[in-house]
Image: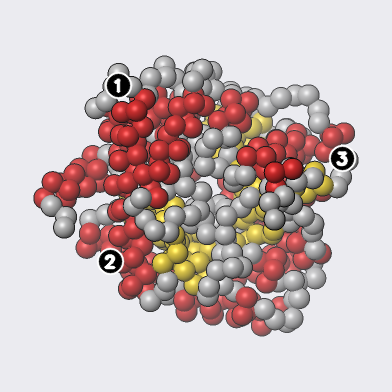
Amino acid sequence: MINFFEVSETNKMIEQEKLDVRTITLGISLLDCCDANLDALNTKIYDKITRVAKNLVSVGNDIEREYGIPIVNKRISVTPIALIGGSACKSPEDFVTIAKTLDRAAKEVGVNFLGGYSALVCKGMTQADENLIRSIPQALASTERICSSVNIGSTKTGINMDAVKLMGEIVKETAEATKENGSLGCAKLVVLCNAPDDNPFMAGAFHGVTEGDAVINVGVSGPGVVKHALESVRGENFEVLSETVKKTAFKVTRMGQLVALEASERLGIPFGIVDLSLAPTPAVGDSVAEILEEMGLESVGAPGTTAALALLNDQVKKGGVMASSYVGGFSGAFIPVSEDQGMIDAVNRGAITIEKLEAMTSVCSVGLDMIAIPGNTTAATISGIIADEAAIGMINQKTTGVRLIPVIGKDIGDTVEFGGLLGYAPIQAVNKFSCADFINRGGRIPAPIHSFKN
């Protein structure tokens, strides 16, 4: 039974420490919408999304009001569109019509983002996959709420370097297509390795083909809660530090589990998973970087940062899995630059570089996230960064992703504003030496030896 102390403690975490449910994401299968006629396909997609998700936002608002728990976003993820549009779409332009239909449906039901404008090409590309990928710049430039992801590698298959090369070009084209808005389209595009099928967070959310017709996934967040808890154990040893993170993660996840089950029951849609990720915001006191600094680092990026992040990520997972029977998605700690004020401050003071961020991604939840780079960065360099990050994911059997934003017209020392949860970011330097000959080899980097487990 919940006692008065627990109620008071939860209220304090919400009111003073920025505890929230970051998103309720409704996954919807569009496999039954497939049609060789493009107009019929678009009609089926719109009708199914607006029918299944019609009560998502109102139910989320009701739960938020009744329980006093902030639910920041209500979102939708759908089956990767490259799989759905293969029969009807003969060109990239055809796929753009689907993006606009998805955007219209998202607006109709009131969600802020819809993910799943995606392709899974870790071993090879079909013509439909390539057409969707080539449509991404136009799709993101002509829609408001659509998010796109492309999975280019996995531990089981290796890395599709043809797709890596293409995605470097697509990121550049997306930056150009949305340059009037600070190349914002790139903030809604992520390139992944080992992408999970049940991730509720954007921009990488899609509804996996092994999922049911519809499912409720919830992402929780509480960097401020963890930081506040660690303030009470300053100077204590690593055992005490670890236990404090673990116990706090348990409490945060229990709240997410409550919201997920309530949403599932009220919508009549099965509960899928809780994603345990500590997702920061630009708000002061809601920063993963500040957690690491509370552990004893003068600044995130100092020697010891990767070890501190590894401890944080592991203890978040340990605490979370005890609080929910179904844990999935990314689950751990995000380190996006533009969405974390502590990370922004570290970049501005010269404490952290892309190379240090890459090292940190070997132990964090995802990868190089929301990093603004000079607009004149070459497509080959972007592809090289994607390949490096995919290799970390492939070898370590973990999800990694790259969400780089080459801001057209901006250079090192400038700042770009995205607004809202996307925040703002200083333009960071990238290595100037070329990797073009490596990227242009083509083909596939083989899977690592430890992938053979059958």
Q: Residues within 10 Å of mark 3 (few under 14, many from 20)?
A: some
User: Residue placed at 59% from the left, 46% from the top?
Assistant: 399
The tag earlier along the polypeptide, 1 or 2, is 2
Q: Secondary structure at mark 3?
A: loop
> What's the distance in space between the residues labelled 1 and 3, CA to CA?
51 Å
For the residue pair 309 and 373, the one nearer the viewer reads as 309
**Residue at position x 75%, y 36% from top?**
384
The answer to whether residue 155 is above or below residue 50 is above
Foreground disc of the pair 2, 3: 3
Q: Which residue is mark 2?
A: 62
Residue 224 rendering spot, x and y as whole percentages:
32, 37
Observer-nearest of 208 and 1: 1
Question: Label 1 neighbourhood size at 10 Å, few (<14), some (14-19), many (20+)?
Answer: few
Q: Position of residue 440 (x, y in %)?
A: 87, 40
The residue shown at (81%, 64%) is: 127
- Tell me the CA gap for discs 2 and 3: 53 Å
Q: Give percent across and percent down for residue 53.
A: 45, 72
Above or below — where is 356 with respect to 133? above
Look at mark 1 in the image and give the residue it sits on: 236
Which quarter shows the N terminus? Answer: bottom left
